[in-house]
Image (cartoon, helix red, strand yellow):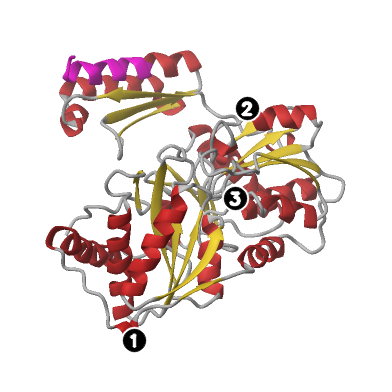
């Protein structure tokens, strides 16, 4: 059975439109609870970000689990990685996060974690899909007997527990004393957590975008909109800036001069720092979107590199397959399996700070040898089948022309969007002019397949 509702990271969409509705969420909670209860699940932890719709979806999800006979523990607003951590440390059987990550407030989503803090298996998701389809299309949703219904409780110290966990990943021999840091929480799930982690480790913290009102999450702030952080770092003459997204699993940073440092550069710094400490870095996992300059810089350190499909789920899968411990995406999802089971922006930032303290360098100075290739991305909207466009001879010819011209000094990637009728054309090259020239060539060929 193929997935009908689950994407690469759970279920996501616009609130009030199927599937992000109370009715669907109730049935999803019931289906997930039924599958989990059949394998012995007794309790799940449910967390959320700061979206107004989180209250509605949390209540519906809670009711669905209770109807399936599963107990529920609520955390309130908390980062996605915190739910993964608490699911494991509380010995709960599963965790649920209600969040649309970096998306605007009017979107929301639901994703699940196993009792080890990892994403559910394909087999579990497919079985949940099967029951969900039956509940939606056939009305086949049954409630357990009244004396078997799940109970609900609230974890009142969830934030404090997670703060202590984050601090515990930072070496006791180091301190953030003397550092001035600007922290942008994107009015999201870490608004009451991130600033306290850095302060309790000794830093002077200027906290911005930490007043969620239910609809300002990610609004011109956070890891996807770096302008306000860059400005704040310059105004406050800070040593650096840290930007999280709405559910705090994505990290971007800014140096003292306002220069943005993305996920690829941060991942390179983490790998280089670990190697300099004498730790074995068996390899690093990136994605199809990871910069070629990043890959070549790792090669110069003698560190192997492999690419996964776009999505932190696929990075984790390849990390497990290879046995490597470090991976991530240029968007800022950074995976360090020695510390966490999923992307965690706060923990990742602490490891970056550790690297800077150990090297005595500023953020950009620590990676001066890393030269990123200019990257051009063009989204081509289609009015036809993406598969036809991707396999069309004229598109193949354009790609071949670009790849021949660029050689080892560039890279071409075409991929279908998973959420919109788009083909994403990406070209990167040492020469920015060539990157733009060949991206336009290929995008033109794609457009010509289905002329308006």
In the image, 278: left or right of 204? left
Question: Is 366 drawn above or below residue 49 in the view shown?
Answer: above
Question: Where residue 221 sits: x, y (%)?
Answer: 59, 34
Element on which disc 1 rests:
helix
**Outermost residue to the right:** 178
- Locate residue 207: give its quadrant: top right
Query: At x 33% / y 71%, what residue is drawn?
Result: 33
Residues at marks 1 and 3, CA–CA distance in whole angstroms: 42 Å
Residue 147: numbered disc: 1
Residues at marks 1 and 2, CA–CA distance in whole angstroms: 54 Å
Report whether residue 258 is seen. no
Which residue carries the number 3 mark?
345
Question: Where residue 147 sits: x, y (%)?
Answer: 34, 86
**Outermost residue to the bottom:** 147
Instruction: Point out the stretch of residues depicted in magenta.
Output: 438-452
The mark that comes first in sequence, 1 or 3, is 1
The mark that comes first in sequence, 3 or 2, is 2
Residues at circles 1 and 3 in contact by the CB criterion of under 8 Å? no
In the image, 357: left or right of 2? right
Query: At x 43% / y 19%, what residue is drawn?
Result: 435
Given this view, does label 3 or label 2 mark the residue nearer the observer? 2
């Amino acid at each position: 059975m193929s997935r009908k509702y689950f994407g690469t990271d759970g279920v996501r969409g616009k609130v009030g439109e199927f599937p992000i509705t109370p009715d669907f969420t109730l049935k999803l909670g019931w289906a997930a609870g039924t599958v989990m209860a059949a394998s012995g699940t007794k309790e799940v932890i449910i967390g959320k970000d700061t979206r107004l719709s989180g209250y509605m979806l949390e209540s519906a999800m809670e009711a669905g689990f209770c109807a399936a006979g599963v107990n529920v523990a609520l955390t309130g607003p908390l980062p996605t990685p915190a739910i993964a951590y608490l699911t494991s440390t509380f010995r709960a059987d599963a965790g649920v996060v209600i969040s649309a990550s970096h998306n605007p407030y009017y979107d929301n989503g639901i994703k699940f974690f196993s009792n080890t803090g990892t994403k559910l298996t394909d087999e579990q998701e497919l079985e949940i899909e099967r029951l969900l389809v039956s509940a939606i299309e056939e009305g086949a949703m049954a409630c357990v007997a009244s004396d078997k219904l799940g109970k609900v409780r609230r974890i009142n110290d969830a934030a404090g527990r997670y703060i202590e966990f984050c601090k515990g990943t930072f070496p006791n021999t180091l301190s953030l004393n003397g550092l001035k840091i600007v922290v942008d929480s994107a009015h999201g799930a870490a608004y009451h957590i991130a600033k306290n982690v850095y302060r309790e480790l000794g830093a002077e913290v200027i906290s911005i975008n930490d007043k969620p009102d239910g609809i300002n999450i990610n609004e011109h702030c956070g890891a996807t909109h770096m302008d306000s952080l860059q400005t704040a770092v310059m105004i406050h003459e800070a040593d650096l800036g840290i930007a999280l997204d709405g559910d705090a699993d994505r990290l971007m940073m800014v140096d003292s001069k306002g220069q943005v440092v993305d996920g690829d550069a941060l991942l390179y710094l983490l790998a280089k720092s670990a190697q300099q400490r004498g730790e074995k870095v068996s390899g690093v996992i990136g994605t199809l979107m990871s910069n070629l300059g990043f890959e070549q810089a790792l090669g110069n350190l003698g560190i192997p590199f492999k690419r996964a499909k776009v999505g932190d789920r696929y990075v984790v899968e390849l990390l497990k397959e290879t046995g490597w411990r470090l991976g991530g995406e240029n968007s800022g999802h950074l995976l360090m399996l020695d510390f966490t089971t999923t992307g965690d922006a706060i923990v990742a930032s602490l490891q970056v700070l550790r690297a800077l303290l150990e090297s005595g360098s500023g953020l950009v100075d620590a990676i001066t040898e890393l030269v990123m290739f200019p990257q051009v991305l063009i989204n081509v909207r289609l009015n036809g089948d993406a598969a036809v466009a991707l396999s069309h001879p004229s598109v193949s010819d354009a790609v071949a022309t670009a790849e021949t011209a660029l050689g080892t000094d560039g890279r071409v990637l075409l991929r279908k969007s998973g959420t919109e009728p788009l083909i994403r054309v990406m070209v990167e090259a040492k020469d920015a002019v060539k990157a733009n020239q060949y991206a336009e060539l290929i995008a033109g060929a794609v457009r010509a397949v289905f002329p308006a």
